[in-house]
Image (tube, rainbow, N blue to C red):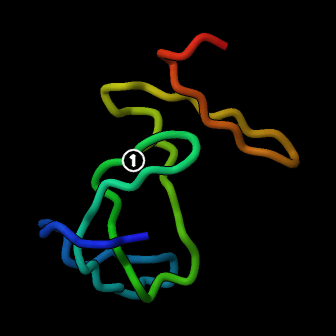
Amino acid sequence: MFSYLNDCNTKNIYVGDHKSLSVLGTQTIHLENGQFNDVLCVPTLSYKLLFVYQITHPRDGKTIEFSPHDVVTRDLRDPI
């Protein structure tokens, strides 16, 4: 997903068992449901994670709907 990386101030993240994981850098990524800025590259992380706050609080504004079998992200600028 990352073809190049930008430098970032975050050098480590901490996970639930208080383990420290190294951050290599950031990049903007483009997915089917939008563009996400300042995505951290953490190669030793077992799963790809997106934080709800990071998705719902940028300038362009998105909503997230959770259901038992699906998660839908919508851009607030697009008509439904």
**Residue at figure coordinates x 82%, y 39% from the top left:** 67
The quadrant in which the C terminus is found is top right
Camera-side residue: 56 or 75? 75
Report the residue that reaches farthest toward the right. 68
The quadrant in which the N terminus is found is bottom left
Residue 64 against residue 37 in the figure, above or below: above
Residue 31 against residue 23 in the figure, above or below: above
Report the residue that reaches farthest toward the top. 79
Q: How many marks?
A: 1
Seen in the image, is 54 located left or right of residue 48?
left
Residue 15, picture quadrant? bottom left
Residue behind mark 1: 36
Residue 10 against residue 37 in the figure, above or below: below
Seen in the image, is 30 located left or right of residue 63?
left
Find residue 53 and report its horizontal and vertical position in percent: 44, 42
| Mark 1 residue crowding within 10 angstroms, few (<14) / some (14–19) / many (20+) | some
Under circle 1, the secondary element is: strand
**Residue at figure coordinates x 33%, y 74% from the top left:** 13
Find residue 9 and report its horizontal and vertical position in percent: 12, 66
Residue type pointed to by label 1: Phe
Report the residue that reaches farthest toward the front. 3
**Residue at figure coordinates x 39%, y 47% from the top left:** 36
Find residue 29 and report its horizontal and vertical position in percent: 39, 55
